[in-house]
Image: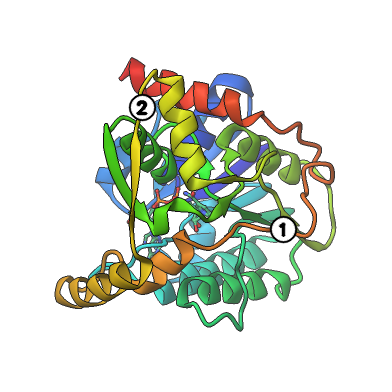
Amino acid sequence: MKIAITGANSSVGLNLLNHIVSATEISVIAGVRSDRAMQSLPSSPQVDPRIISYQDPSKLAAALEGADCIVHLAGILIENKNTSYASANVDATEAVVKAAQLLGAKHMVFISVVGAGKDSSNAYFRSKGLAEELVKKSGLPASIIRTPILLGPNTAGASSLIGAATQAKTKILGGGKYSMRPLDIDDLNQAILNCCNSGSTEAKLYELVGPEPISYRDLIQKAASMMNNKVEIGSVPVAIAKLVAAISSRVKGGGITPTVIDVITMDEVVDSNADGALNITLTPLQDTLKKILEHKKSK
Ligand SMILES: NC(=O)c1ccc[n+]([C@@H]2O[C@H](COP(=O)([O-])OP(=O)(O)OC[C@H]3O[C@@H](n4cnc5c(N)ncnc54)[C@H](OP(=O)(O)O)[C@@H]3O)[C@@H](O)[C@H]2O)c1
């Protein structure tokens, strides 16, 4: 099987590439937007790095030609002066859908987020919901996987968690009372590859979350105690954090906004976990934390 990955230099992309290279014989077209991003990709005969652009779907199709399955990972939570939800989450998905149609791709996998919805009042969730609609209505055999916070080497979630858990004192949004369902990135890697191999002929939506709900506060405490650390957790009131974010993001033209704070502090809840449907045995949270802490120690 040959797959093409867009946003291959994203943290999810690098984890997927490393998994593919170390555990499978799959060949990959790894699509990135710059030479700099290309330097971050693992060097392997299985990986064919290519510079791609989302401006012209026919050129994008030419760059992804030969792939049986297209895994679309490009997407952002934090906007900046150079990238927005509209361009990164919606327009890029539209271009990939058109390219996949031109190629007659056998399958497309799109990574979305728990909470996505085209009518959401939150701009991030709305953009991912609109992107889901593009995939659903494309007529392509496709898998849309909504994910929660992802824990794995160098994911933003793991870096923030370890950063907080190694402190003696830390202050977090709302005291970290919100509930999360952290998902091991290795479980997502397996789910993506299972989707590519599924032979499904329609577009399906999956919500794949980790095995246990836990508040962010307890997650930090759990990680800290695994490092034999004791961390005192204080609270930054969410309303104040949003006010500060509104001002600073305006001045900087991006970064943490009230929208991002609403995403971070949302309870990650799903009606039904797709682990069974995706044929995944979920990694226990304790084992996931052990893996990310060991990875951090090895750096
Ligand atoms: N990390 C999580 O916990 C999490 C949770 C739920 C869903 N997801 C989804 O998983 C996917 C990967 O997330 P990640 O955290 O690994 O991402 P990431 O590390 O932040 O990387 C973002 C990727 O998006 C690309 N990108 C940015 N602006 C773009 C634009 N305007 N057009 C096309 N590409 C653009 C970046 O390319 P450049 O380097 O060239 O800018 C990079 O490849 C995203 O779709 C995200 O929504 C992630």
Residue at 34% x, 33% y is: 231
What x and y, as percent, mark residue 197? 77, 41
Residue at 53% x, 25% y is: 21
Q: In which quadrant of this rendering is ligand 1 seen?
A: bottom left
Q: Relative to 94, does residue 15 appear above or below in the rendering?
A: above
Q: Relative to 233, does residue 243 appear above or below in the rendering?
A: below
Q: Is residue 50 left or right of residue 71?
A: left
Q: Residue 257 carries which label?
A: none
Q: In which quarter of the image is the C terminus?
A: top left
Regarding residue 55, the answer to whether it shows in the image is: no
Q: Which callout, 2 or 1, points at the residue further toward the start of the chain?
A: 2
Q: Residues within 10 Å of mark 2 (few under 14, many from 20)?
A: some
Residue nearest the observer in this picture, 58 or 196 = 196
The amino acid type found where label 1 is placed reads: Val
Judging from the image, what secondary structure is the residue with disc 1 in? Answer: loop
Judging from the image, what secondary structure is the residue with disc 2 in? Answer: loop
Scheme of image coloration: rainbow
The amino acid type found where label 2 is placed reads: Lys
What x and y, as percent, mark residue 288? 56, 28
Disc 1 target residue: 270
Residue at 57% x, 53% y is: 179
What x and y, as percent, mark residue 84? 35, 72
Q: In which quarter of the image is the N terminus?
A: top right
Disc 2 target residue: 230
Disc 2 and disc 1: Cα gap in Å?
32 Å
